[in-house]
Amino acid sequence: MKKILMAFVSAGVLVGAVSAHATPEQDREHAIQYFKNKFPNLKWGDYTKGALAFNKDAWDQYESIMSFPPFESQIEQSKKMWETPFKNGKTYASCFPNGGKNVAGNYPYFDDKLGKLVTFEMALNQCREKNGEQPYSYSDMKTMGLLTAYARSLSDGMLMNVEVVGPGATAAYEAGKEMFFSRRGQLNFSCGTCHYDNAGNRVRSELLSPLIGQATHWPAFRAGENVSTLQNRYKGCNQNVRAQPFKEGSDEYNNLEYFESYMSNGLPMEAAVFRK
């Protein structure tokens, strides 16, 4: 393990991986070309598979699990949460265009009136408050995590379509990019150490997924029935590198999700899937 850590810490590919003066689209095109050169056998759609794209046996096991998912009862519960009327008789579907179908891929977006990013989970809480309900905690996977699982599945197949327009949005995107490439914790890792420099390599027994596609398949059910949102996974990753995690819904994680979501633009979404 010590040799693996030293190899990760000494990796130098991250330097100059994306330019400080590049536009978001230039960043995305650079990343696409970088991974295309690194993994010439991967097809564009394979990036939605995450680390499973590097191991056919693991992908076959995934498809077998998804044929009879062990979290089917949780999905049913999630659907019930989405469809149950608020006390005023309205539902979540009333808060979104097309009843919530094919909208999640537009999140996060920068709301100029609010002066901040709005994630899909924030939009769900805005809906709750608009209809006289108390907001859910972003860290509560039994409420917000479970609700989001079905709500995002209504956009399965939608291509990620996150926009960065205007100074506020650009600042949030740049903050997310900085967060992704900044080292932290006792192990001195950044998100990019694993998911840019060392994508496709192993840490212990686990293959590391590439940056592109990471925002497409959340929430995921990990280890069977445990639902996890993307930001909940950020928290776990920070803990793994022995860094103090931020809270789900924090500006830091919202910005990071914005950056990663933009970098996944053009890839199809698939929520509520199995991951190890």
Image (tube, grey):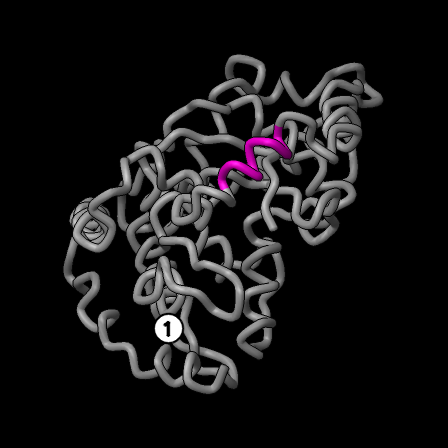
Name which residue lies at 72% across and 49% down: 137
Residue picked out by circle 1: 182
- Quarter of the image for residue 72 reads top right
Mark 1 nearby-residue class (10 Å; few <14, some 14–19, many ≥20): some
Name which residue lies at 17% across and 69% down: 16
* Tag 1 secondary structure: loop
* Left or right placement of residue 226 versus residue 112 in this view: right
Q: Nearer the viewer, residue 120 or 2?
A: 2
Main structural element of the magenta stretch: helix, strand or loop?
A: helix
Q: Is residue 268 magenta?
A: no
Q: Is residue 106 above or below residue 224?
A: above
Q: Is residue 135 above or below residue 208?
A: above
* Residue 82 position within the rendered picture, expressed as x and y whole percent measured from the top left: 72, 24
Span highlighted in magenta in the image = 59-66
Name which residue lies at 58% across and 56% down: 233
Q: Residue furthest right?
A: 87
Residue 111 visible from this viewpoint = no
Q: Is residue 147 above or below residue 177?
A: above
Q: Nearer the viewer, residue 188 or 55?
A: 55
Residue 209 visible from this viewpoint = yes
Q: Is residue 65 magenta?
A: yes
The amino acid type of the residue labelled 1 equals: Ser
